[in-house]
Amino acid sequence: MDYEKFKESVKEDLGKMLKTRGLTVNIQEHHMEKLNSSYDALTITPEDSNIGVNANLSAMYSAVEDGQSYSKMLTSAVNKITEGLRNTPNVDIQDLTNYEVMKDKLSIDVVSAERNAEMLLNIPHERIEDMAVVYRLVLDKNDSGNGTVLITNKLMEQFGVTKEQLHADAMLNAPEIRPSEIRGMSEVLSEIMGVEMPPGMDTQDEKMFVATVPDKIHGAGVIAYPNFFEEAAEKIGGDYYVLPSSIHEVLLVKDNGDMSVKDLEAMVRDVNETQVAPEEQLTDHVYHYDCKEHVFEMADKYESRLAEKEAEGRDSDKDSLLGNLKAKKEEVAKEVSDKTSKEVKNKSREGETL
């Protein structure tokens, strides 16, 4: 089906089907620019409301192109839209520009700075290695995806606050409304499979941990929380690698020498290519936290820093050895000089005696 005809048909049919469910709506077509993705969308707004939901028109078309029937695609879309409209948070539009009201809803995400470079030009953010910390308003407790608002430069200006103030408030509020969770992989897998943890399993036995938030949505942002790295190091028991599993969580792997950085990077790339949707990918890189130096950095930087330290240590040992040899040489020379002086004095005395 031609894409333009498809769009017109979907708009008309969605309106009719929603009306049979008691929903009279306005449907507007536009292009959505979101972090990690962009797509054509339909915004469906009830006639008696200013808040609606977005339906991914591009994804609908792809589903039909991939073989799904038009009617099945449409029914699925209507079900999602209906659920979204029913769960739309009750928010006063005027409050959305009132910072004193909204700052208690501040949360944070982390995204790839490279993949979102153009969009980040219009979004307040802070860099953390090759990632960007961005800010959201969580409008409902479940954070179902349609209950958050990404803060743009324009919205920040309407708030009348600086980026520094926004960041400081988000760092205080985000851990309160969406606290971090760090759990061993065994516990997570047991929960997923609905089985009990192995008897006697202890945190010390874990080599991999999952860090996210309670609802497990946009949970990778916990790495930007104050003191997160230190708290994770205490739980894990030392240095660790950070693997960007997705925008929803990160994996923390003990730095115990079992796996090389190359192996970990290969794992991240493979998972991104085969298991994580493009719009949910974070980065393809591996990171490291050094608990002694309190440094979070890309793993290759850590290896370079470690190599430099080892080289400096070798140079220091070499300098120390040379210094010791020089000191010993000077000591021997002094002993020889003292001995020679003593012999000369003794000979002088012998001459006087004669």
Image (tube, rainbow, N blue to C red):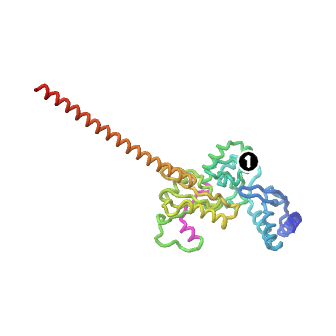
What is the three-letter code of the residue carrying label 1? Asn
Query: Which quadrant of the figure contains the C terminus?
Result: top left
| In-front residue for pair 244/77 | 244
- Which residue is more in the foreground, 348 or 286? 348
The answer to whether 335 is drawn above or below residue 74 in the figure is above
Residue 166 vs residue 308: left or right? right
Question: In terms of depth relative to the viewer, which is nearer, 313 or 210?
Answer: 313
As for residue 182 lying within the magenta part, the answer is yes
Q: Is residue 166 visible?
A: yes
Span shown in magenta: 176-191
Residue 14 image-quadrant placement: bottom right
Residue 251 at x, y percent in the picture: 57, 61
Residue 266: x and y in percent read: 60, 63
**Residue holding disc 1:** 122
Is residue 348 toward the left or the right of residue 326 in the image?
A: left
> Quick one: label 1, few (<14), some, or many (20+) residues within 10 Å?
few
Q: Residue at x 35, y 40 (%)?
A: 326
Q: Which residue corresponds to the image point at 14% horizontal and 27% vertical from the top-left?
A: 351
**Which residue, as the protein is rendered here, is positioned at the far top?**
352
